[in-house]
Image: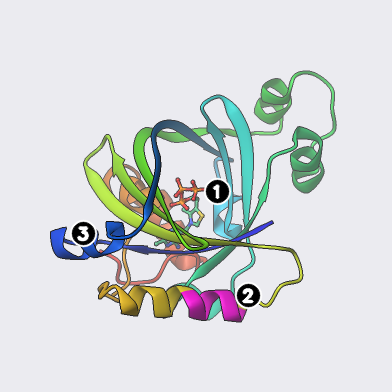
Amino acid sequence: MIEVEKQFVVGEVARERLISGAKFVGEVKNYDIYWDTADYLLTTNDTWLRQRNGRFELKVGINEEHAQHEGETLCYEEVEDEGAIREQLGLTKKKSFKADLAEAGYAPYGSWVVTRTKYKKGDFTVDFDSVDFGYEVVEIELLVAEGSDLTIASQRIVSFAHDHGLPMKPVRGKNSTYLLRNNKRHFDALVAAGVLPAGEE
Ligand code: V4E
């Protein structure tokens, strides 16, 4: 499946509007550890390798280059199967997944805990994320099948956001906020690669 998502920073009024009529799904804590090489091979290609609650996942960006710059929605393919992740990374099986990653030069670059309060509104998922390093963001997401029209899904998210009076200005995600605060060299590399918008200071 493809995830089409857009993030927002919202105040109390917009939060109430989003929750009104939505179905509460639950609250979870996600322990995320993000991995990359020393020269940021993955993230500068809009590819994000993480361990979420111990389990590896790869999110591969399928975004037009302009998408981030215009604050549009972002589209990612999520790969969860270890074999498929190995294939995507070109990582031959020799030892354990972690050992093979380390041998190929991958290491964790950041970790944090996200308390996620999840709602469903129609087929939209609304996640209120609170990060342990002090950051809050709301993510509106649609899951679509491979080969679906991503533009239509993006337009639906934008119109959902308009209907709920969400501020349309570009927001910084959890990763970029962490990197801006903790690893400016990595942050700057992502801006230079066009993965994060310039001027996100
Ligand atoms: C950094 C990044 C990605 C890695 C995953 O980030 P995010 O979607 O924020 O994590 P999370 O916890 O919400 O994942 P989920 O549970 O939805 O799978 S994917 C894309 N980016 C880049 C990015 C960006 N350019 N702009 C914004 C606002 N967010 C993320």
Identify the residue position indicated by label 3 in the image.
Answer: 16
Q: Label for residue 68?
A: none
Q: Label for residue 40?
A: 1
Q: State the image quarter where residue 153 is shown.
A: bottom right
> Local crowd at mark 1 within 10 Å, few (<14), some, or many (≥20)?
some
Please tell me whether mark 2 sits on a helix, a strand or a loop. helix
Give how far across and how far down residue 15 sits, in percent.
Answer: 23, 59
The stretch of residues the image draws in magenta is 151-156
Amino acid identity at mark 1: Tyr
Identify the residue position indicated by label 2 in the image.
Answer: 150
Amino acid identity at mark 2: Leu
Lower sequence index among marks 3 and 1: 3
x 29%, y 73%: residue:
164
- Label 2–label 3 contact, CB within 8 A: no
**Considering only vertical position in the picture, is 103 above or below 20?**
above
How far separated are the C-alphas under marks 3 and 1? 39 Å
Please tell me whether mark 3 sits on a helix, a strand or a loop. helix
Q: Residue furthest front?
A: 21
Q: Main secondary structure of the magenta part?
A: helix
Residue 57 in the figure: left or right of residue 17: right
Residue 165 can be seen in this image: yes
Lower sequence index among marks 2 and 1: 1
The answer to whether the beta carbon of the residue marked 1 is less than 8 Å from any atom of ligand 1 is no
How far separated are the C-alphas under marks 2 and 3? 28 Å
